Amino acid sequence: MSENVEVVVYTSPYCSYCNLMKMWLIENEISYLEISVDNIVDVNLKNEIKSVPYTFIKKGNTIEKIRGFNKEELKNALGLNAPIG
């Protein structure tokens, strides 16, 4: 994974897929920032996030958004080519 990648995961406290997402990121040694949807004050962002986890992956000036917990989408977005749990 490239060093200039930022990962932000929007979650909610009782979301089992959010917990799976966080465990996957930790297991694969991917740094991330977690933000609870309960703490979002930006109305436009709050309206955009219809389900959690909702992940923003920023590479340079590009932001990829991933809804839900999808390992293949995450691996592609993060540039992980080797098989990962």
Image (spheres, grey):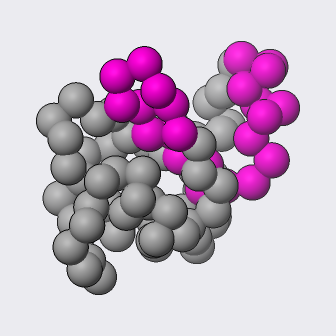
**Picture residue at 79% right of the left edge, 21% below the top:** 44
Quadrant into which the C terminus falls: bottom left
**Picture residue at 42% right of the left edge, 51% below the top:** 77
Tell me: 74 left or right of 67. Answer: left
The segment highlighted magenta reads 42-64
**Picture residue at 72% right of the left edge, 26% below the top:** 45
39 over 13 or under it: above or below: above
Question: Dividing the picture into quarters, in which one does residue 4 lie?
Answer: top left
**Is residue 50 visible from the viewing direction of this image?**
yes
Tell me: 83 left or right of 71. Answer: left
* Position in image of residue 9 (x %, y %): 49, 45
Q: Nearer the viewer, residue 47 or 35?
A: 47
Q: Nearer the viewer, residue 66 or 34?
A: 66
62 over 17 or under it: above or below: above
* Position in image of residue 64 (x %, y %): 53, 39
Q: How many marks?
A: 0
22 over 44 or under it: above or below: below
**Is residue 19 visible from the viewing direction of this image?**
no
* Position in image of residue 26 (x %, y %): 25, 62
